[in-house]
Image (cartoon, coloured by chain):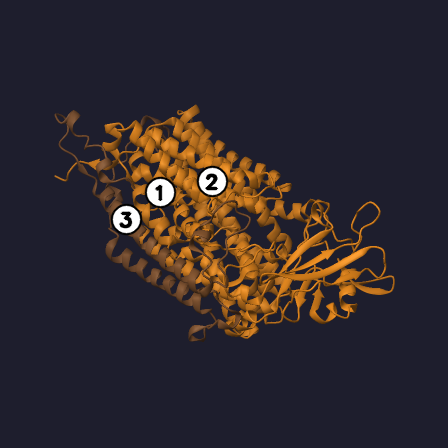
Chain colours: A orange, B brown
Amino acid sequence: MNETSSITMMVFLLYIVGVFVLAGLSHRLLSKRSFLSEYFLGSRGLGTWALAFTFAATSASGGSFGGYPSLIYSYGWVLALWIGSYMMVPLCTMGIMGKRLNQVARISNAITIPDVLRDRFESPAIGLISSGTMVFFTICFLVAQFKLGAIIIEDTFNLQFDYAYEVSLIIFAVVVIFYTSYGGFRAVVWTDVMQGIVMGLGVLVLIPIVLNKTGGLEKATKTLAQQPPMAITSVPGPDGAKGTFNDLVFHTTGTPAPAGIAYRNPEKPNSPLLIHWQSDDELAFAEITMATDAKGQVTTTANQVKRAVEQDAVLGNVLKIEFPYKNNDTETVDGVEVSHGATGVIWFPEGKSEYRYPMIHGHELVFGPGRTNEGRPFHTLGMILSFFTMWAITGMAQPSTMVRLIAFKDSRTLKRAIITVSIYFGMIYLPLIAIVMAARSALPVLTPEESDRAIVLIATRLVSDMSIPYQMLGAIFIAAPFAAVMSTVDSMLLLISSSAVRDVYQRTINPDVSQRKVKIISYSTTAVAGVLITLAALHPPNFLQKLLVFGAGGLASSFLFPTLLGIFWKGTTRQGALAAMIGGFCTTVGLFLPTLLGGTRIDSLGLHPSLWGLIASATLGIAVSKATGPPPPHLVRRYFYKQPPT
Amino acid sequence: MPGQDDNPPPPNGHSLAENPPLVEDPIYLHTRREAKIILVMWVVAMVYTCSYCYLYGYASHPSDPAVAGPTISDWVGPLESFDRKADSVTTPLGLGIPDWVFYGVALPWLACIFVSILFCLFIYEDDDLDSVEEAVSPATEGASNERN
């Protein structure tokens, strides 16, 4: 283990010790207060800093420090527009519903979101359906987050042995399950505060380091705009294995022109090895056809492609080929030095022996819409509108953040928290783009799959030759994505157990349950939920990222309008709320179904399915409420009227 | 949000004898007004940022060929005269941020932080949530009993 790894390990251990200490302190409070209200809601006593950081850290899931930097690396500055809606996220997600939701929850003494809906509409059916919906989408989301947590441990400590992923997953799961089960909501909130500080500090620390080491953002942006086209292959291995199957990076050293060049594999003259490129409007593709054996299996190695290109009189002048990260170690095979990882057979999915790789211009990383690895535009107008709506509006309806809005102490706390989170998000999301774009030139070329490592590489490579204090700061930054994943996972684990214990067991099966039994059930449900999700994450499905988007979108379209209409519109009936919830659920699941079955998502009119889920939910909620209204007068009186002051 | 006319009448009538006339909850009225203002601010931010960036920050304005049927991009059109070229990028104030990101995202982001602070300080009401009477429904008695 080198010095950087030792320092990283030390920072990680300190961080985990801190988490356990906070869980212990929180557990002591559990014995002094009402158990359920304390375990799942922190006794409705969150102050400004606690509310601000728990809200920010829960919203900023692992994606903020894993997927988001990876997208910046792959698509460039257009990510500023992609994330742009975060300028309004604190005000929208906390300001629109926060105070009113807190009031409605206090009126009925609700401690979970299904609790709020159940009491608002006096409908056990709504309580149970919302619990079921919440658990379903939350589990989808959590399986993906657990995998991300394990990958961060595996990557950060560069674990390279059999079952490295499984060991990393178990370490992650044990830490999270223990402190969440043991400490409950308050432990989650306190660790969120710590994690929020780690994340913010990490970004602030890295900005000057990166700008100083890479020559500044100005230079990086202008260099990138003039960069010749480049294609990065990302051939996944069998069963989705990544990073081991001979990815190649094609750099053009001049402007691509329409051309077709055939080349024969010098070692197998009868097997065609074709590398040609052609222009398709402005988009050029590197197209390779591999040599195959008698059974039709591809036999060409990445090294053969590289050598063939280098030796070709024409191609050698216009194309430069290199192996991306992980494939740049060399070894000697039969007396010839070859790149490790590039000696195996190139593997194409679904038995293909041909593939087209788009050559992406440098200026496509400076301007929109960005280009996917299949050559499709990344952020089209429909997606611009969808994402601007999704972050700010659907962000309101994530149960993990909504439950924080029923847990704060008073409205002054909420106001201060909105201001704090507004500044905090501004300090994190835009600077992250600057960090990744400035550091891009100093990083090895990463395939789309490997680009998840961008943030870890930035933090390790750029500080590895600096003094120990800087290395410690780099290690703090590496801990940021880990903290982000943990802060989301712990909140969602509690959501699942609160649904099971409060909404299903206590309020439906056994209302007279004793406090002692409630405690045992709460601890064990949180732990069992964590164990089950760990087991699912041992063999996660390949469409993990899609599962993550599906989970978040599904939660939003199922919960936003039942809650929003319920707290702001007197005319909402229980049938209307139920229709809004089921309509949002079915629309989202229906439009995502093709993706989950391996096909293409249905983006009608180019808009994201979550948006259609919201539209369906709102329409059904209003129409059915009007058709079945008016709602019971005592409910309207309870939630919308009060005695005049005397 | 449906209009106020769609709301049921104040539920005072059936038990006027026992209860004095009710008034609309001031916290409900404040939060409804604040929610409308925030939504208007969000729409303004969306219209400005999305239209500015789409017009001045895109090298091309295509629709996604993988989407079946018409898309919003098709309706708006290719906007070729707005397509940015590689050498057209400038970085205002020498910060290294491309012009369209600076004017389309960074500046409005700063403005939104500023407006959010003003909104919280001067418009968002300091309602007293402690005055809310916690009703104990039969269903929630289990939780309440714990305190005893």
- The residue that disc 3 covers is B36
Q: Which mark is residue A406?
A: 1
Where A538 sits versus A255, above or below?
above
Q: Is residue A538 visible?
A: yes
The N terminus of chain A: image quadrant: bottom right
Q: CA distance from mark 1 to mark 2?
A: 21 Å
Compare residues A565 and A646 and report the one nearer the observer: A565
| Residue A62 on image: x %, y % | 52, 51
Q: CA distance from mark 1 to mark 3?
A: 21 Å
Q: Secondary structure at mark 2?
A: helix
Q: Which mark is residue A554?
A: 2
Give, as a three-letter code, the residue at label 1. Answer: Ile
Give the residue displayed 66% in from the left and 48% down from the top. A165
Residue A593 occupies quadrant: top right
Residue A335 occupies quadrant: bottom right
Q: Secondary structure at mark 3?
A: helix
Residue A97 occupies quadrant: top left
Give, as a three-letter code, the residue at label 2. Answer: Gly
Chain containing the residue with disc 1: A
| Residue A519 on image: x %, y % | 46, 33
Give the residue displayed 19% in from the left and 32% down from the top. B9
Outermost residue, right side: A334
Q: CA distance from mark 2 to mark 3?
A: 25 Å
